[in-house]
Structures are given as structure tokens and as C-alpha cells.
Image: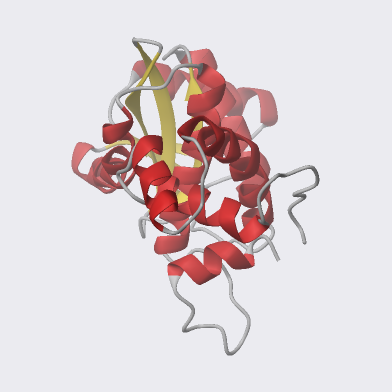
């Protein structure tokens, strides 16, 4: 398996099922615990939470080896996530077709945070031709700073209605995080959001599949990442 389950006390298929339910649907870990119990699996909600934090990044890494290319016109925005009672910032970008480019949870909302996100996204997907933002001075400064440092010529567009696509896309993530009522730690938030964003991308058919596998369900594609 691409994912290491060494030392796990449950079968991989049980772990993956618990992780998928939590990151795919608006459920709390206690809801997942109850669903597991109905299927004869005795596991507590804290263990499910640890599974999500541990295995989501590994599954996302496997996903990126098979992720479809994205367009060179990006839409960048950020949304709010509550961690330990405080609002933190989830930077996200999609292309003009609404396909997820990348995401990053940060403690601050400023030029430095925006640049860290931009650098991460470009490292994975290459330099875009243009980025549409909502007028954020910090995001604009981050793009200009990146251009100056790297000799790139990323065009900046500040057109509100063109950014509606990324603002609408936030809903797919917030729909799942809402029942969680905030995260107890930054690490937990980070790991869980990786899983949620991963499922969101699979639902948007951003995973390249082999011939004959086009009819696989979202759940089946998720499990394939661990194979």
C-alpha cells in the first residue's frame, strides 16, 4: 500500500472508512463513532480524530501524484476557520473552471501569509499567467513581491464578480467544517482540512483515472489512493 498502516490497531479499510466519512460529510467524530458502532466496530471518537490527522496528509500526497493539471488563470481568496476559539485564515485558490489549485491554513491574514500560500501553490502547479483577487491589499502585495523576487510577470486582476467562483467554492469546505464547531488545535485543523479539501477535489473529478476506471464512485477513488 502507498499509505503506511504499520502499528495500526484496526484494518486499513476500517480506518479509511472512518476518515472518509468525517472529511466527506458534515459529521462530528461522535457521529462517525456511532456509525462505526452500527457496523460492529468499537472505536472512540478521539481515535477517529487521530486517524484523520495522521492519514489525510498521506492520502493527499498520493492524490497529488495523480492530480489533473489546472488552468493558468487563478482566483485567490481566503475564508475563516475557528481554531481554539480564535479565527484563523484558510487561503484557497481555484482556476477559472473552479478546480482547486491549493490551500493553506495560516494564523495571520497579511502579506507574508498570502505569499507563503502563493509560493506553495506555484511550487506545485507552476507560475500562473494571472491571478484574480477581491481587492485585498495584502494579496496584491504578495503577488507583486513574488514577481519582483522571481522575475515573473503574474498579472493581477481586481474584479469582484470573477472571484465569485472561489467564494462559492468555499461553501463545499465550510459545509463539512460547520458541525465540527471549531478545532481544538492548529495541527488538528490543518490535518482535517487537508482531508476535507482532498475529498472536495475528488468530488470535482480532479483525480486522473486509468482507462476503465472512469465509472468509479468518489468513495472508490478515495480508497484507491491508499492502494
Judge by depth and name the residue closer to the eye, 9 or 71. Answer: 9
Is 168 situated left or right of 222 in this image? left
The answer to which of 219 and 201 lies nearer the viewer is: 219
The quadrant in which the N terminus is found is: bottom right
Residue lying furthest left in this view?
Answer: 161
In this rendering, is residue 118 above or below 1?
above
Residue 110, quarter of the rendered image: top left
Numbered disc total: 0
Residue drawn 51% across and 44% down?
195
Q: Which residue is at a point 61% across and 31% down the rendered structure image?
A: 119
Quarter of the figure with the C terminus: bottom right
Identity of the residue drawn at 59% across and 51% down: 15
Q: What is the x, y in percent for residue 83?
A: 40, 16
Seen in the picture, residue 2 relative to 221 is either above or below; the reply is above
Is residue 64 something that shows in the picture?
yes
Image quadrant in which you'd find residue 167: top left
* Residue 12 spot, x, y in % from top left: 66, 56
Residue 134 point in image, percent of width and height: 28, 30
Near-viewer residue (212 or 90) = 212
Residue 74 seen in the current view: no
Residue found at the very far bottom of the displayed protein: 212
Residue 36, image x, y percentages: 44, 51
Amino acid at each position: 500500500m502507498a499509505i503506511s498502516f504499520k502499528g495500526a490497531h484496526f484494518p486499513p479499510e476500517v480506518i479509511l472508512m472512518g476518515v472518509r466519512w468525517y472529511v466527506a460529510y458534515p459529521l462530528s467524530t461522535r457521529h462517525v463513532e456511532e456509525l462505526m458502532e452500527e457496523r460492529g466496530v468499537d472505536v472512540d471518537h478521539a481515535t477517529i480524530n487521530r486517524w484523520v490527522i495522521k492519514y489525510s496528509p498521506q492520502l493527499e500526497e498520493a492524490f497529488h501524484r495523480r492530480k489533473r493539471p489546472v488552468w493558468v488563470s487563478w482566483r485567490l481568496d481566503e475564508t475563516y476557520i475557528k481554531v481554539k476559539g480564535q479565527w484563523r485564515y484558510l487561503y484557497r485558490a481555484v482556476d477559472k473552471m473552479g478546480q482547486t489549485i491549493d490551500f493553506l491554513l495560516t494564523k495571520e491574514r497579511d502579506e507574508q501569509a498570502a505569499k507563503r500560500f502563493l509560493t506553495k501553490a506555484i511550487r506545485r502547479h507552476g507560475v500562473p499567467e494571472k491571478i484574480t483577487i477581491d481587492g485585498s491589499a495584502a494579496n496584491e502585495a504578495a503577488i507583486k513581491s513574488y514577481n519582483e523576487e522571481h522575475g515573473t510577470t503574474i498579472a493581477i486582476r481586481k474584479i469582484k464578480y470573477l472571484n465569485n467562483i472561489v467564494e462559492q467554492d468555499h461553501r463545499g469546505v465550510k459545509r463539512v467544517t460547520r458541525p465540527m464547531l471549531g478545532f481544538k488545535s492548529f495541527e488538528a485543523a490543518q490535518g482535517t482540512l487537508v482531508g476535507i479539501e482532498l475529498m472536495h477535489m475528488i468530488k470535482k473529478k480532479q483525480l486522473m483515472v486509468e482507462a476503465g476506471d472512469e465509472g468509479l464512485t468518489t468513495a472508490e477513488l478515495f480508497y484507491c489512493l491508499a492502494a
